[in-house]
Structures are given as C-alpha cells and as structure tokens.
Amino acid sequence: MGTTVVCCGSATYDLLYQVERLPLGPGKILPTAMLEVAHGMATSAATAIARLGGQARLIARIGDDQRGTLFLREIGAAGVDCAMVRRVADAPTPLCSVLIDAEGERLVVPYYSPALGSDPGWIPLDAVAAADAVLCDVRWPEGAAVVLDAARAAGRLAVLDADVGPPEVILDLAERASHAVFSEPAALVCVGGASIEESLRALAARLPGFVAVTAGAEGCFWLAGDEVRQLRPPPVEAVDTLAAGDVFHGAFTLALAEGRGEVAALAFATVAASLKCRQFGGRLGAPDRAEVEALLVS
C-alpha cells in the first residue's frame, strides 16, 4: 500500500466558464467553453495526490442531492477514497461558479449552505491517526481543527492550506499544523504585512511549524535560517490557474509524507502546480508523477 494522505475540507460542484476577460462591472458575458466538474480545495488536492501515485482519502460534507451523487462518482473515479465524505440530509451540495479568462486568471464564487452543519464529531479520528499525513483547508475550520490535532497527537504530518479567510481562524489552524503554506493574500492579511518577506518573517516568528508562502507566477517563499528563499516555477503557457494552489498543497504533502525534505517537497509541488495550468478544467489538469519528475530533472 502506498503513502496515505487524508484531506479534509471543501467539496463543491463547479461550473467553469472560459471567457475572454473577467468582468469589470455589470453586463453579460458569453463564454467560449463550459465545464461541470466536482471540485473544492481539499477535494482537488486529494485527486492530485491520487494522480501522483498516493493513496488519498477525503473528509468532507456534501448534500444528498443529485450534485452530491455526481460528486462522489467523479471523485471516486479519480482514485480518491470517499468513504469519509458525509452526505447531509436536506442540504445542497456546495456549488461554485468560476470565470476563467484568456490569461488563466479566475473569478470564483462559491456557496456553502449553513444546512451542511459544522459539527466535526462524526469524523473517524482513528483513520486520521493511521494516515501518513493530513492536509486541511480553511473552509471548514471545525473539521480542520479536529483533524490537525488528531494528526499531531499521533505524530503525523499535519499540513494547512492557509488560503483567504478570517485571520483569527487561519492563525488558529496554522498554530495546530506542522506545516502551514499560505497564499500571498492570506499571508498579507493575517499579519498586516506590506510584502511577502515581511509577512513570511512575521508568520515564522509566530507559528511553531514550517511556514511558506505561495505567490502564483512568482513561485513560493520560505525561510532558511534568517534568509528568505524563493523558488520560481518552470515556464508554462497558463490556460487555467484554477486549482493550481490545491495541486501544490497536495503534491507538497505527499512529497513530505514520502520522506522528502521541505525544500525538495516545495520543488516537487511547484512543478506539479505549474503543469496543472496548461489546460482548461481546474483539477482535471493535474499532472502525473512521470511528468513532474521529468521536469524536475530537466
């Protein structure tokens, strides 16, 4: 059996629209392509892990509606164990509309119904403790807190995808993680920094674990001692950046769980996330291991 990573957090059903440019105001936009796909931050990370050869298990909440059925079918077909995905009666599966422009940039509008509930008491913590690593996003803080705590108590790797959200929530979760990888907007907001370097230093001083910041085409940043290091991604023609961060976090967590050091894991994740951007379709563009390893050694 391969390396097992439990992913906890967002599960959505997405409507992706390819457009020439993102809207600047009210009006009507005619897309050039459209795709319906099961998605979500933790979900996309889990499918990326499976694509890279890991054993991915997903903890998430969806509705008992048709979209929920489609979600389970698609994510199961992608190689993810969905036994810990909970279907909530009389709740709609989260829905997300995404506009993706000609440069690959996107506008994301997700909706999570309060009917999904927030109680994490049903999560099977024995499965969390048995995994090699866990990866949590910030869209279900109550679930993330329980999973991160259980992983740390069992001596497992506990990675946080620290994307935008209430700063106090993100920082609380980051303090529970062994590794916290922030998006640039989240890093700036959480500590009120004026730059990536300033924010990275402030976060590293505050948090007990490893800290890194991702910044899209600028790559990722981390501290080596007192020195800020940057790893730029390989050049690709970006068609769709949706889920690039999710693929990054999934690849990073898998690489750590397989025994790579933080810098090697960041390099692996940077290449995986870059390759994902080559095609329209969000998580569907995630590369396999052979593609990533080939670019790493080139």
Image: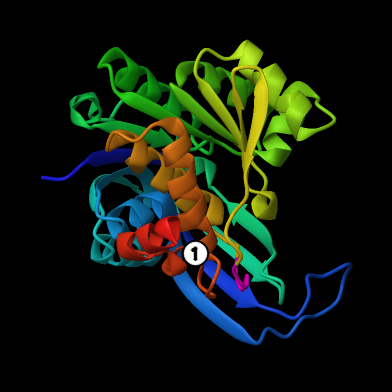
Q: Position of residue 282 (x, y in %)?
A: 51, 66
220 over 27 or under it: above or below? above
Residue 261 sits in which quadrant? top left
Quadrant in the rendering for residue 187: top right
Residue 251 appearing in the image: yes
Say if the magenta span includes residue 156. no
Quarter of the image where the C terminus is located = bottom left
Residue flagged by tag 1: what amino acid is it? Lys
Residues rendered magenta in the picture: 236-240
Query: In the rendered view, would you say 92 is above or below 267?
Result: below
- Please identify the dominant SS of the magenta region: loop
**Residue shown at 41% from the left, 50% from the top:** 45
Residue ID at (54%, 75%): 280
- Residue 85 in the image: above or below residue 65: above
Residue 197, given in percent of the width and then of the height, sits at 75, 29
Residue 118 appears in the picture as rendered? no
User: For this view, does 237 lie left or right of residue 176?
Assistant: right
Which residue is painted at 36% across and 58% down in the image? Answer: 293
Residue furthest toward the front? 298
SS state under label 1: helix
Q: Nearer the viewer, residue 144 or 224?
A: 224
Depth check: give the residue in front, 30 or 66: 30
- For the N terminus, which image quadrant? top left
Q: How many marks?
A: 1
* Residue assigned mark 1: 276
Q: Is residue 233 left or right of residue 124?
A: right
Lateral position of residue 263 relative to residue 237, left or right: left
Disc 1 residue crowd, few under 14, some 14–19, many 20+, Cα 10 Å: many
Left or right of residue 106, residue 6 in this image: left
Identify whether 221 is placed above or below 108. Answer: above
Percent from the top left, x then y, of residue 5? 28, 39
